[in-house]
Image: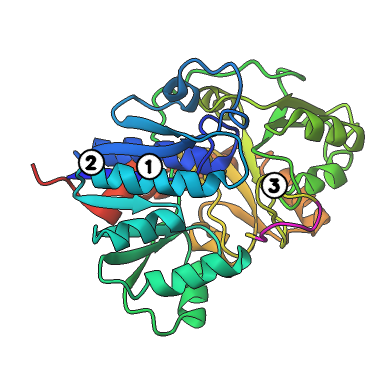
Amino acid sequence: MKVVYISNAILPSKSANSIHIMKMCQALADNGHEVTLLAPNYKDKIEPNVSDIFRFYGVRDNFILKKLSVPNIKGRLLLYISGILFFLIKNKFDYVYSRFIYGSIVASILRLENIYESHAPICVTNKIERWLFSKLIGMPSFKRLVVISGTLKRYYLEKYPNISKEIQVAHDGADPVSDFDQRAKLEGNPGGIKVGYIGHLYRGKGIEVIENICDKVPDDIEFHIVGGTAQDVEYWKSKCNSSNVFFYGFVPQKDVSSYINALDICLLPNQKVVRTFGSKGDIGSNIGEYTSPLKLFDYMSHRKAIISSNHEVLCEVLNTNNCLLVGADDFDAWVLALERLREEGFRNRLAEQAFRDFSKYSWKNRAKNILGNAVI
């Protein structure tokens, strides 16, 4: 099928949603679909000095990336929506896949069959988008709502009991690891136990856990933190000033795998309140109850032992056979879990089970479960 994926993501950028979108377009193409990714060209917001967007995200160029020019003026969102309308009128597609509520509305108005994917409750955005969603779910061309967790599906069923379309749960994913031997050179003691955290450092992601336990663990345990803006890294360096904590800052997606390969244990210390990328203080969506973290599936695909907060949403994927689950803010429990995983045999057993469980969470399988194989 000819599929257009409509997003409002900044490409390229450091946001997780942009990684998700690029990986899904690659996966849809891997399943035989002819894919075009539509995104706004917000030149004032893109990551600078990126010559090859596909390489930046570590994906193959097996789909078309079409960025619509949008000037930096007030009301440019409306210009982008208008651009989507004209693009869909001018080009023929069999199906529209959207991470952008306005894109799904435009597709439905044009009577194009479409799927809308949501990663957070629609009510936390604004009144216009809530109203648009209530209209979207009743439009004949809208076929399905895809959500990233069972808790998010439950939210939509509770808030919109009259929704007549299918709600499909599709947790996030990762690509199978192509080279387990490619390892980044980490700082610290070569014989130390390398404990890693991959991802952003904004509120609720769990760097607070490392801050509180880094000086309470055995001497052979080190913490290696990959990700975060320069500002966030400097802030957390001042908080985690123990000699066994090392920061590497933002690493392009194509290089992340080598860092995970070099780790022995991976942390998923999500707190109850997790803010979205770019949130300031208490302002922004709390995705803690609904999230499906990309790093989780990267950890699993790399055959790593995982310690995770025992939130309900994370336990949709994790269990006591494939990781250690502890209270998000029970710092003593995090220390105890790390001490248990110093035993290599136990660490490897957890890692192997996580790796076996990963098979159903590849991006290709996710895309196939949502849209199926192309009819050739």
Under tag 2, what secondary structure? loop
Chief SS of the magenta region:
loop
Residue type (three-letter) at the residue carrying disc 1: Met
Q: Quadrant of residue 343?
A: top right
Which residue does the numbered mark 2 point to in the structure image? 91
The reply to whether dot 1 and dot 3 touch (C-beta < 8 Å) is no
Residue type (three-letter) at the residue carrying disc 3: Arg
How many C-alpha atoms fall within 10 Å of the one at disc 1: few (<14), some, or many (≥20)? many
Residue 253 drawn above or below residue 210: above
Which residue does the numbered mark 1 point to in the structure image? 24
Which residue does the numbered mark 3 point to in the structure image? 340
Under tag 3, what secondary structure? helix
Q: Which residues are magenta?
A: 281-286
Residue type (three-letter) at the residue carrying disc 2: Asn
Q: CA distance from mark 3 to mark 2?
A: 57 Å
Mark closest to the chain's N terminus, 3 or 2 = 2
Name the residue rendered at 49%, 63% in the picture. Answer: 316
Say if residue 122 shows up in the picture. Answer: no
Residue 119 drawn above or below residue 178: below
